[in-house]
Image: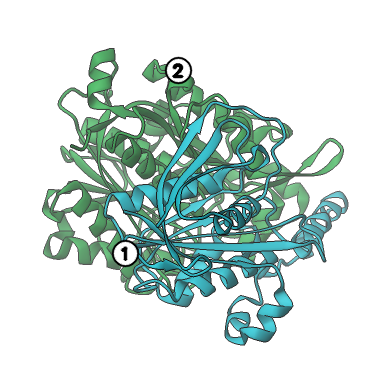
Chain colours: A cyan, B green
Amino acid sequence: MIYLVATAQRSDLQAVRESSPEIWRQVRRYNLPVQLALAAADDVIQFSEDPSTTAVISLAPCQPGSADLYRWGHVVTAGMATGTLGNLRMNPTQTLHAVDNLALSAFAISHGNHAYCLGLGGAPGQAWCGLEAVHERLSAGAEEDVLLMAGDQDAAEDGAPGLGVALLFSVRAKSYQPLGRIVRLLSISRNNTRTADVVPHAANGLAAFLPALVEQRQGPMSYVVPPEHTDGLSGVTISLEIL
Amino acid sequence: MKRRVVISGMGALSALGATTDELWTGLLANRSGVRRVQRLVESGITVTNGGEVASVSPQNVDRDHEIANRAIEDALVQSRRDAAECGFIWSTGLDTFQMGPNGFVHRSAGLCFSNLSSRFSGPRRMIAAACASGTQAIGEAFRLIQNGRVDACVAGGSSVMLTPFYLIGFAGLQAVAVDNGGDPSTACRPFDKRRKGFALADGAGAMVLETLDGARKRGATVFAEVIGFGMSQDGFDLNRPCDDGAGAELCMRRALTDANLSPEEIDAVNAHATATYSGDLAEAAALRKVFANRWPEVPVSGAKGAIGHAMAAAGVLEAIIAAHTCATGIVPPTVNLQHVDEGCELDHVIGEPRDSNAQSVLSVSFGMGGQNAAIIIKRHKEAQEIQK
């Protein structure tokens, strides 16, 4: 049996800074998607049995990097044109912004985590691959808890909105607080439904799934992922049961 | 009942050539494909050595897609599999930043993955574990097939890294060997006293993995069997491993447990061997702990002195080498290793290949940020003989 134990969303960095100064100290040098993913993850990891042994599945942003990084990219372009690249030095933190597993690494460092991990890249629809991986790991009895986290931004520009989402699953039945009920994850199924209307975003799809869950009453539930949140190649349906 | 998983097709583009044969024969000849890249010299940056894939033009703005697709096609053709009957577990590495005819071009790794994946049936998973991505892609595909989720997968990775953007960036992290005016082919010296970091590289490696039963039914060539996979996180630092290699050791032990093997049953190691100061020390420490008293007799070889560090492609290129070792029993030399550094002591294969009848090979990758992946590949009795 697989249970959804806790979820969190974060979109306001200022709120993270004010309400969670310890988290802010850990995440302040990262880019927006990573900051928000880590803040959301921190909200849910307290519900795991042991954060150091919880398996972690992390979705890289579809809009990676940062405004600083892209400005730097244009500096490189100009330097190539003038042959002055030899004088350039890159802030190492900006290189880290380009690395796609940053949230995964930062989470592991913060929580002393040595468990199984899976970083999924910034292609559309990978969130549901992450959910499938959660199901596979817990069904196989490989772990007792699995964290799924994602952070993304609408554009790698100053002031662009961002969103971090985290979901914690467990083999132990616990009440999912927003509902006050136990939520079982039964399956994730796919069909060959192609769509051209995909909107790449690592976190938006998961965020849209959560309100649908809260609206649900006791009993079985099927959530059909909106086409814009898929990979454009297959339709996805999530089956749950609310006890 | 877990299903057995075999390799039935391979494709590789590296600094040693555009085929798996060129990769293997280049290594056996103790040859490095790393060279000084003229367009980098002209750009004025301090890092001009790299492992370039010569068969795809650097002016091609679809270079990321082209390099990946050629490796994938070669693997599919060799296995006689159609993409539409395979899952796709792949890493396209990091976004590419290069100069196009009209200026700066930023290409999303996610977009490249979407384009590559569209002809595969699924699962379609994009792996993002930095330098461990290629090995994890193979491991995840192995697991999906083993557990009956899919019958066949193309697994691997591709990277286009030889751009000023990444060369300057990784130089800032003190991870790459800067150009000192010497022979560029010796820029990357894994485990050597004179090592100064890796040479960045472009590349792609692809494997077709499928069930043993499926390969038999199709009459497909079997090159080797994948028997174990392990992952771990360091949880230590974003830019260096812990000194004792604890995270690396953990993933190796997990792979051994998964394969139901003891360390005594491993015949050779394909090492990550980046030639960074701390990385090589940590890896050597981890290997000595895993093999305990037996470490002086387990041959260890690393490929990055020959092909550079192709990031997302590195793990699968090295797994292809490991599969060749399983099939032939030969462990290739670690190119450019001459004087083993204190703390890096292992049974290094130096100068020339060693015919050690190796049948079970541990292949490891350690990602920047602390993701560690290990797979174990084993000779299969039905394996086609690869020319020694």
* Vertical position of residue B67 compared to residue A54: above or below: above
The spot of residue B365 in percent (x, y) is 39, 53
* Vertical position of residue A150 compared to residue B211: above or below: below
- The picture quadrant where one finds residue B361 is top left
Does residue B270 appear anywhere in the picture?
Answer: no
Checking the image for residue A172, the label placed there is 1
Checking the image for residue B300, the label placed there is none
- Badge 2: how crowded within 10 Å, few (<14), some, or many (20+)? some
The N terminus of chain B sits in image quarter: top left
* Vertical position of residue B87 compared to residue B135: above or below: above
The C terminus of chain B sits in image quarter: top left
Q: Badge 2 is on which residue?
A: B82
- Badge 1: how crowded within 10 Å, few (<14), some, or many (20+)? some
The residue sitting at 77% across, 65% down in the picture is: A68
Pick whichever, A4 or B221, lies toward us: A4
Residue type for callout 1: Arg
SS at mark 2 in the image: loop
